Amino acid sequence: MSERSIARRIGIRTLLFPFLVVIAIIAGLSLGFKFRSESSLVATFGIPVGLFFMIYPAMTKVRLGEMRESMKDVRTVGLMVFLNYAIAPFLVAGIAYFFIDIVFLRAGVLTTSIAAQMLVGIILLGVAPCIAMVMVWTDLARGNLPLGVSFVAWNSIIQILTTPLLVYLLARTSVIVSPVLILESVLFYLVLPMIAGTATRRVMYGRRNYSRVLKYLGNVQTTALLLTIVVIFWGEGFGIVDTPSLIWMVGVVMLTFYFVLFHVGYYLSRKLGRNYPDATAIGFTVSARDFEVSIAIALAAFGAYPYVGITTAIGPLLEIPLMLLLVWIQLRREVVITTKMGLSTVGGTKK
């Protein structure tokens, strides 16, 4: 398929979106420099509101019956649990060790003390799967959203038990993950958007302007995503100037483990017979990380080691651009897959 054909199928707005993201990042950094004293307040209130309006439009597309059926899919849920808890944390730790201890430390760009703290910070980023933004990435990439929502529900329960064990195994530190922290995330980023989305769907479904409402909510989601990027870089972006060398080093590690984790989940799912939407939901669930939990553990258990906290704080700055890159890759992949499926049905024979 030609590049022009792929571009037509994906859509002009999606192709232009990376440029809008860059503009949002620059705007956030500029506001952070000019209004640094207000950055903490902006991040505290702006990020939760932005995330809500990113997730709520996606929830209008979820049928509760489909989500219940997805939660009962033992084989698919089991595959996700295996990848998320038996593979992902150890793979992240291995990738972090390779870059930090073998590449960066031997190249002389890090001291031993900072390298050790960075390694712990990256490990903290890898232990807990995301229970919020993963739904947005799955929706944007046209994955199986009901399946993705069911994964979030399972992970919100499982990570309370597994995170302390994984932190102890990989970072050799005993921690307690507050169920309240997980409960707050589930309530605000799953339950409330689901209630709002279900209510919107029931009120509007079947009406003449239903499709127009969905299109409008899609614009709300895009706008909320861009504004959230502005707020994140306003609230935390000054760290790019304060610790510039750490940004690119953490970025290299995160870019690697996002791509590796996503494609391990996606291709293994495809190998086991899952279709594109299901495999996409698994890929994003395996790769997206819960930064709220990581930062909370860094502050509670590693407060005496500043670079652990700095490393986990850099995570949210880099997650959105990197995950959007994966979304764009998946949209191209979906176009190629659907086109091949269409060609395979020519002559009345479907492969």
Image (tube, rainbow, N blue to C red):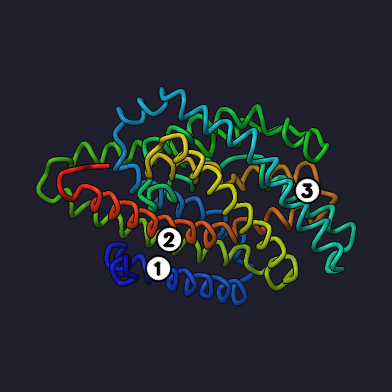
* Secondary structure under the numbered disc 1 in the rendered image: helix
Give the amino acid at mark 3: Val
Is residue 310 found left or right of 77 in the rendered image? Answer: right
How many numbered tags mark residues here? Answer: 3
What amino acid type should be assigned to the residue bearing mark 1?
Phe
Residue at 58 percent of width and 28 percent of height: 158
Disc 2 marks which amino acid? Answer: Trp
Tell me the CA gap for discs 2 and 1: 9 Å
Which residue is painted at 79% across and 57% down in the image?
A: 100
**Quarter occupied by the C terminus:** top left
| Marked residue nearer the N-terminal end (2 or 1) | 1
Quarter of the rendering containing residue 4 = bottom left
Dot placed on the residue nearer the N-terminal end, 1 or 3: 1
Q: Quadrant of residue 107?
A: bottom right
Q: Secondary structure at mark 3?
A: helix
Q: Residues within 10 Å of mark 1 (few under 14, many from 20)?
A: some
Badge 3 crowding class, 10 Å Cα cut-off, few under 14, some 14 to 19, many 20 or more, is many
Q: CA distance from mark 1 to mark 3?
A: 34 Å
Residue carrying label 1? 17
The one of 221 and 88 positioned closer to us in this rendering? 88
Circle on res. 120:
3
* Residue 257 rendering spot, x and y as whole percentages: 63, 52
The answer to whether any part of residue 132 appears in the image is no
Q: Mark 2 sits on what residue?
A: 328
> Residue 330, which numbered label?
none
Q: Position of residue 105 (x, y in %)?
A: 85, 62
Callouts 2 and 1 close, C-beta under 8 Å: yes
Q: CA distance from mark 3 to mark 2?
A: 30 Å
